[in-house]
Amino acid sequence: MKHLAAYLLLGLGGNTSPSAKDVKEVLSSVGIDADDERLNKLISELKGKDLQDLIAEGTSKLASVPSGGGGGGAPAAGGAPTAGGDTAPADEKPAEKEEEKEESDEDMGFGLFD
């Protein structure tokens, strides 16, 4: 990923065809050593390809990946309603209890700057 990130940064900077040397310079500027084998493979895979087209193609592929969606599961509300009975809307008290619990866990007996 670090090699690809450096390659993309060079592309955004206007270098339409970054070389392995260019990527190594970017990585070394932040104290990261490049893996020559992976870097050479990346350069050979991307040689002659337009970055914008690759990004658009990747985005369309990601759109088809199921990601769960819909948010997390609902918290337990104390029990299932009985069949045929009217149920009242859920109170917000359980949410308040969760917040109190989180607050009590935060400091754990010491402060951040102690």
Image (spheres, helix red, strand yellow):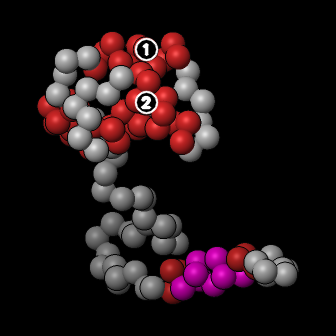
Q: Residues within 10 Å of mark 1 (few under 14, many from 20)?
A: some
Q: Amino acid at mark 1?
A: Asn
> What secondary structure is marked by label 1?
helix
Q: Position of residue 64 (x, y in %)?
A: 21, 35
Q: Position of residue 72 (x, y in %)?
A: 41, 58
Which circle marks residue 65 in the picture? none
Mark 1 lies on residue: 40
Q: Is residue 102 magenta?
A: yes
Q: What residue is shown at x 41% (from left), y 13% (from top)?
A: 41
Q: Amino acid at mark 2?
A: Val
Mark 2 lies on residue: 23
User: Where are the magenta residues, as a range?
Assistant: 96-104
Q: What residue is shown at x 33% (from left), y 66% (from top)?
A: 83
> What secondary structure is marked by label 2?
helix
Q: Position of residue 62 (x, y in %)?
A: 25, 36
Residue nearest the viewer, comparing 14 with 78: 14
Are the residues flagged by discs 1 and 2 in contact, CB closer than 8 Å?
no
Give the vertical position of 81 relative to 63 (above or below).
below
On the picture, is 35 further left or further right than 17? right
